[in-house]
Image (cartoon, rainbow, N blue to C red):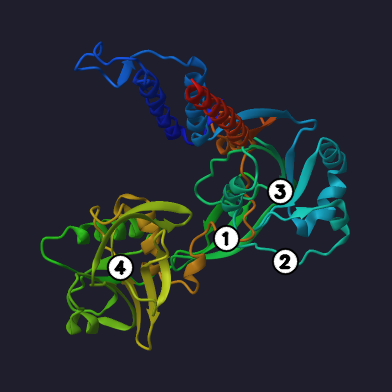
Amino acid sequence: MHFLSPIGLLALAGLIVPLIIHLWNVKQGKTLKIGSIALLGENSKASAKSFKINDWLLFLLRCLLLGILAFSLAKPYLKKIIPTEKETGWILLDSATFKEVFKSNKNTIDSLLNKGYEIHDFNVGFKALTLKDTAKHQSEKFDNIDYSDLLHAANQFIPAGASVYLFADRRLTRFGDELPILHYQLNWIPLNQTDTIRSWIAGYAGKKYEAKSNPSNTTYQDLHSGDEAPIKIAIHQAPGTPDGKYVIAALKAIGSFTNRKIVINPPAEKADIGFWLSADAVAANFKSSIKTNGTLFQYENGKIIEEPSFIKLDGRHIKLSKRITSSDSAEKILTDSFGNAILTEEKTKNLHTFHFYSRFNPQWNGLVWDGLFVKALMPMVISTENTAEFGFENNAADQRRLSARRTVDFQPGDIQSTSENTQNVLLQPLFWAVALLIFVTERILSFRKKTADVKH
């Protein structure tokens, strides 16, 4: 037997009440009619006392009543095991390709359905599907949601430990940087296993590359090595702060990776990019030192909020300890876990401005210690037409796939079986009924005892 509110058992202390009542048994003295009062002493008592239990049945009933009430307040319940007749689990597949997937995997899906599995759409909401849906045209599709987020969200819908069969391809472009930990047993049935080879021309860091991709890897070959103009960057930081050194280290890494020459604080030329790493307002002469249509990255000033959070960047969570209160006037590029702006973007006629509501400092966040710091700065340093798709890895033609052995990384250390279900049976109504019966019995016996004492 288990209890929902064990604190109710403290009421058992009330058992001392009937014990005191029955031990401190005070009886009123009887009046006797006699012929003479000469035999009575001056200090005769009108009552008598005895420290013993004279009515054990009433005593036990009252103790039992208090005990039953205490157990009722603790809300007792029993766990009832309900064995399942069929193996339960889910079949996950994309409703947009349901007909094709069912046609090529009919035997496997039919076998799972006979065991009691349910078909669900591998998409937002995980809507239940039936075989009749194979004839329907499913138009709603959310291609922008990666598999990592969907598999993690399924933890809220699928019973812990349940078996899940997923029919989907293993394209790496559909995954974030971190694989989710799942509370269910995932069995991945891969689709599109043909060794397709694709090629395309990619623009990166001001250069053109020929990309060739197959399921195991993607390679890039430089098509030409022209002499690109150097990138000129101006940096201003508040005195006594280390923020500038982190930015300079990241800029050197970008220059080394892209083979682009980067000049920091050019003495006589206008800068392509300016980093204002100070809470003070951007100085007019610093802003004028940036060329027309250049880029300005500036710290924002305001109320400092200290609360544990994180910055979601490229599918990963980076620790955030401090931020500056922000307005919603500009377009948000980075936010914290509460949706507050950390980096916003604003484009004007002559300047492209990034507003940063934190600091490049380990006391504010863990960004400067993470390899993603370089990747975060890359779109600001190397101009691209579409910063949202900056880099090689986001091309839709990328054929790389997650290897079969990596699927074990989805699983927790120990997954419990769901062959048995449990149901909690509340015993409180039964205890209340017994308490009522005992109370009625106690009142009847008590009334009879008083009647008998009066007659005597």
Query: Taking 266 as reference, is 147 above or below it?
Result: above
Q: Which residue is mark 1?
A: 210
Q: Which residue is mark 4?
A: 357
Residue farthest to the bottom? 349
Residue 133: % across, % down: 84, 57
Nearer to us of marks 1 and 4 is 4
Q: As shown in the figure, which amino acid type bears the numbered disc 3?
A: Ala
Check the picture and name the quadrant holding the N terminus: top right
Residue 59: % across, % down: 47, 20
Q: Secondary structure at mark 3?
A: strand
Q: As shown in the figure, which amino acid type bears the numbered disc 2?
A: Glu
Is the residue marked by circle 2 packed among few (<14), some (14-19), or many (20+) residues within 10 Å?
few
Q: Which residue is mark 3?
A: 168
Residue 223: % across, % down: 53, 63
Residue farthest to the front? 35
Q: Which residue is mark 2?
A: 140
Instruction: Kindly report the distance in space between the C-alpha atoms of the residues bearing marks 1 and 4.
Output: 38 Å
Residue farthest to the top? 39
Instruction: Kindly report the distance in space between the C-alpha atoms of the residues bearing marks 3 and 1.
Output: 29 Å
Is residue 315 shown to the viewer in this render?
Answer: yes
Instruction: Kindly report the distance in space between the C-alpha atoms of the residues bearing marks 3 and 4.
Output: 40 Å
Q: Secondary structure at mark 4?
A: loop
Q: Secondary structure at mark 2?
A: loop
Nearer to us of marks 3 and 4 is 4
Instruction: Kindly report the distance in space between the C-alpha atoms of the residues bearing marks 2 and 3.
Output: 17 Å
